[in-house]
Image: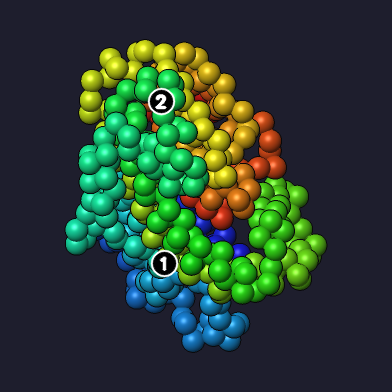
Amino acid sequence: MYKKTVVFAAFTFILFSVIASAQSAREFLPQTELFKRALAQSDLTPGDVRIDFEDMALWGGDKYRVSLLDVFFADPWKISPYTRSLTDGLLKSDGDISALTVSAHKRLDSGVRLGLIGDPLEAYRKRVEELRGKNLAVALAELTSHPEAEFKTVEYRNLPDPVRDAAALILFAAPDVLHYRELALVEPINRLKLNPDTVYRTVLDYVIVEWEEEEEEDEGLETMLLIESLLDNTDWTLLNTGATLIALAAQEARRMLTETDTTLFAQDFDFRVNTQLGYIVLSGASDGYYSSDDHLLIIDTAGGEAYASCAANRSFDSPVSVCIDLGGDDTYRNEDATSPAFGAGVFGYSVLIDCAGDDSY
């Protein structure tokens, strides 16, 4: 039932987005008057055009229906102006990743607005500034439980300060992001006595089936019950708090990298660390290839890169993946059609920021 509702909502949004776009130059009032005149031919008024909730109750409820759909059911005339307003808001926030994230979560009734009171990144910024040249080494030591000195290699010392600082900021935020995911998702899965890897694969296989191949009668009862259990037990507010925090951190890292002397990035540097959460790669001017391994963090400042995968949760054990590419003509090509890639957050958080270049996806 919830899937049908989501499909109906998506269709409704698409339909009225087209209408709103086609008529963006017109005022809504004349449009309303036209509908009034048309309805009057059948002795109806705009107030008669609605979906009655009491009538709907005869067919059973749907606990997964979102509030916005209820608003549109009660008054379909709000769809066009609301869609136009939402679209305008998204376009105005096109450079604000966290605002876009929150907007999407609000439509799902679980938006979290970090930063209304205070700066959610203040503690991480302070550590980056206080630790300066060794901040990234400290962040890696805390993340991996390895000695700080292990990371202070020649490659580490060759890193431009802005790259080191931006990477440290994201890695200082990562444990808190992971904590929100642990509380929101991992603990409920454990309480349900489910295997996380099996859950990941089962749900991913379910949602990536091609539409024309989808046969509702073939949907297994066990899979549907599993998905409903996850919907009912996941703490969406906490999960989205982690998403908003990593979006804020990635956005701030981008600012730190772009509002600096970018000539520093023309040099060739390459620093790589393998962690239990995936590879960390900080790379400079040379062209490179990023395989379909799990990547926790990629910052690439120049050169034409070829990405087989990045910014994707390719398994349940790859909960966070961030890629920031500052420039160059890059190619993004997913080499594994059964796995997510390039900004697809699945049971985790993924952020892809490509700032410039003639890129191919």
Residue annotated with mark 2? 156
Q: Amino acid at mark 2?
A: Tyr
Circle 2 sits in a helix, a strand or a loop, which is it? helix
Q: CA distance from mark 2 to mark 1?
A: 37 Å
| Position above or below: 285 against 100 | above
**Residue 268 appears at what percent x and percent y?**
41, 13
| Position above or below: 198 against 358 | below
Q: Residues within 10 Å of mark 2 (few under 14, many from 20)?
A: some
Q: Name the N-terminal-most of marks 2 and 1.
A: 2
| Position above or below: 114 against 168 | below
Depth check, front residue: 337 or 298: 298
Depth check, front residue: 106 or 27: 106
**Residue 76 appears at what percent x and percent y?**
39, 67
Answer with left or right where residue 297 lies relative to residue 258.
Answer: right
Q: Which mark is residue 237?
A: 1
Q: Residue at x 34, y 62 (%)?
A: 112
**Residue 71 appears at what percent x and percent y?**
38, 71
> What is the quadrant of the N terminus in the image?
bottom right
> What is the quadrant of the C terminus in the image?
top right
Q: Residues within 10 Å of mark 1 (few under 14, many from 20)?
A: some
| Position above or below: 246 against 111 | above
Q: Nearer the viewer, mark 2 or mark 1?
A: 2
Q: Amino acid at mark 1?
A: Thr
Q: Residue at x 37, y 19 (%)?
A: 158
